[in-house]
């Protein structure tokens, strides 16, 4: 079973990578860029075949290791 | 208009970050992890209000700067 965990910096948390990308886009001629936020996307392939169990496993993984809960939010999506 | 650009390493391209996460998960007691792939997720807030134009702008940004087309694939999704 494939599961995607999207991890983004929380609202209000400074995102220097996103800022750098925003500046790069503007300096390369892309206009109208208001804001850029950059996060991580992790695709897990698990043996688990029960979607509910797979989702709760992925949530536990995100809380324990994948995301830094102080500064990041995450979202778990079942892909297949 | 908010647009998400998901960038993942192409199939077959080595993904050391993903491998490291996989090992970390297994060594911390999560069983049944077959594979882990790690990519980037970039959320752009653009002035553009026409979804089609915003999508084509985001695609151009991804091809020119955000993604390395040799080793990465990307997907553009309109959020709102």
Image: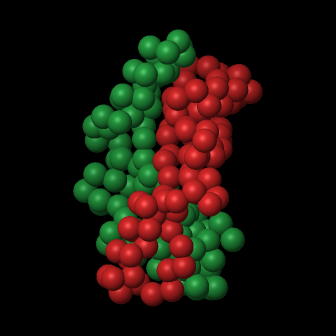
Chain colours: A red, B green
Q: Position of residue A72 (x, y in %)?
A: 59, 46
Residue at image coords 50%, 46%: A41
In the figure, residue A54 lies in which quadrant?
A: top right
Evaluate whether residue A54 shows in this view.
Answer: no
In the rendered image of this protein, does residue A56 appear above or below residue A39? above
* Residue A11 left/right relative to B12: right
* Residue at horizontal 62 percent and vertical 60 percent from the top: A12
Residue at 49 percent across and 48 percent down: it is A40
Quarter of the picture containing the N terminus of chain A is top right
Q: Residue furthest left?
A: B70
Q: Where does residue B54 sit, x and y in percent of width and height? A: 55, 80
> Does residue B42 sit above or below A58 in this rendering?
below
Q: Quadrant of the C terminus of chain A?
A: top right
Which corner quadrant of the image does residue B17 belong to?
A: top left
> Quick one: A14 or B22, which is closer to the camera?
A14
**Quarter-wise, where is residue A27 in the image?**
bottom left
Question: Which residue is at 53% across, 29% downward?
Answer: A65
């Amino acid at each position: 079973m494939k599961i995607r965990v999207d991890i983004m910096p929380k609202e209000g948390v400074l995102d220097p990578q996103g800022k750098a990308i925003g500046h790069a886009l503007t300096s390369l001629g892309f206009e109208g860029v208001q804001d850029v936020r950059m996060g991580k996307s992790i695709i897990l392939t698990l043996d688990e075949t029960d979607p509910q169990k797979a989702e709760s496993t992925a949530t536990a993984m995100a809380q324990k290791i994948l995301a830094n809960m102080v500064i990041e939010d995450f979202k778990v999506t079942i892909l297949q």
